[in-house]
Image (tube, rainbow, N blue to C red):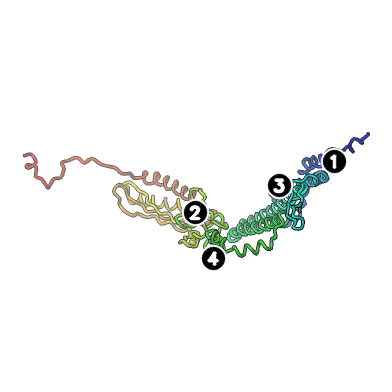
Amino acid sequence: MNLDFLQQELWGNSLMVYLRFAVILVLALLLKKYITAIFTRLFFTVFKKFSADYYGQQFKELLLRPIEGLIVTIFFYVAFNQLSTSFDKLILFKRMKPVKEAGQEVASRLVTLMDLVDHLFFLFLIFYFILLLSRIIDFVIMVLLHKATEEHDRGRQQIYPLLKDVLKVVVWGFGFFTVLGVIFHVNVAALIAGLGVGGIAIAFAAKESLENLLASFMVMIDKPFTIGDWIKVNGVEGIIEKVGFRSTRIRSFDKSMVSLPNRKLIDSNLENFSERGMRRVKFSVGAIYGLSQETLENTISAIKNVILKTEGTMGQPIVHLDEFGASSVNILVIYFVSAAPETDFGSVKEKVNFGIYEAMYQHARGFAFPTQLSIDGSDVNEVVPPAATQE
């Protein structure tokens, strides 16, 4: 086969060069998934001892995008390098400076299309590399959190998310300064020194953010609560889900998510109900008038048994005849529910209520409700005599 026609030049490059360029791009698009799968398996063999086999899918999902991005970036750079001869001749703009001797302006630097390709290559390479490190941090913290959850270590469950945020800020900060130094040729050391001088102004501008950041570390040190604790602060009541840089996430009992600034946690009165280990429930049940003492005693005993048999309740319940109301004989009910994270307070309370409902109809003929009776006879009137009324 005669391939001499591939040596013909078009816009400064032979057809063979354009063919290589196209083949590399096609290979990048066709092989990126297979190469990514190979590298993902290689990476996972390193972390396999640290984690378990069932983390393989999560590991693949986390590292898929950064590894695929790195592979495509490298392939594209190799492809565009095939056209470097033409790209070096395409001048995008000239940086000029005056020459004192001649009194004229000459080009001090020519920025070509290939320079732009080089800068974009390093930008994407750094971005996907930092993204890869960030996803590895996500995976490591995910495994550590899972182990802490299995061991019921709420202290580690609280500190690992904050540690992840700190590490990711450091990694992305390193990537940012690397981009400034490598791509934009900024003197990073001088820039950091300048930031030290302007740090006071930045501190004033970010005063609230810094307060919340320091408050998050104070929470970690003082430990007024841990992940999974039931707290009440600033009118917000619920379960602690995460302590972040700026705020703490609290899941209220109506399942809404509340983000509370960390500084409010240390400035406000905070009640940790989990520390007392249980939550009290108190209410009254009204029985109808006319029941015998034996019936009321059987009803009270049945209510006690319902509470004792319900999983999640703690200690001995208090159930006794409390008072005579306007329309009912009131039975006071007091019992305690475990405040452990695995105990669903609403579910336990619902089971107790269903049991009391059945017990009242089985032993006390149901519940009392406000009623009015019509009494035959004349009205009592000791103020105005009947004779005076007739007149």
Amino acid type at circle 2 is Gly
Residue 238's label in the rendered image is 2
Secondary structure beneath label 1: strand
Is mark 1 in CB contact (under 8 Å) with mark 4? Answer: no
Any part of residue 40 in sight: no
In the image, residue 86 above or below residue 243: above
40 vs 238, left or right, is right
Amino acid type at circle 4 is Asp
Is mark 4 in CB contact (under 8 Å) with mark 2? Answer: no
Q: Earlier in the sequence, mark 3 or mark 1?
A: 1
Q: Quadrant of the N terminus?
A: top right
Q: Earlier in the sequence, mark 4 or mark 2?
A: 4
Secondary structure beneath label 4: helix
Residue appearing at x 57%, y 57% in the figure: 244
Q: Which residue is mark 3?
A: 65
Q: Earlier in the sequence, mark 2 or mark 3?
A: 3
Amino acid type at circle 3 is Arg
Viewer-proximal residue among 124 and 98: 98
How crowded is the residue under tag 2: few (<14 C-alpha within 10 Å), some, or many (20+)? Answer: many
Q: Which residue is mark 1?
A: 13
Q: Please name which of the two marks, 1 or 4, marks the residue nearer to the observer.
A: 1
Marks 3 and 1, how far apart at CA: 34 Å
Viewer-proximal residue among 235 and 58: 235
Q: Which residue is mark 4?
A: 222
Marks 1 and 2, how far apart at CA: 68 Å
Q: Position of residue 274 (x, y in %)?
A: 50, 59
Amino acid type at circle 1 is Asn
Quarter of the image where one finds residue 102: bottom right
Q: Please name which of the two marks, 3 or 1, marks the residue nearer to the observer.
A: 1
Q: Earlier in the sequence, mark 1 or mark 2?
A: 1
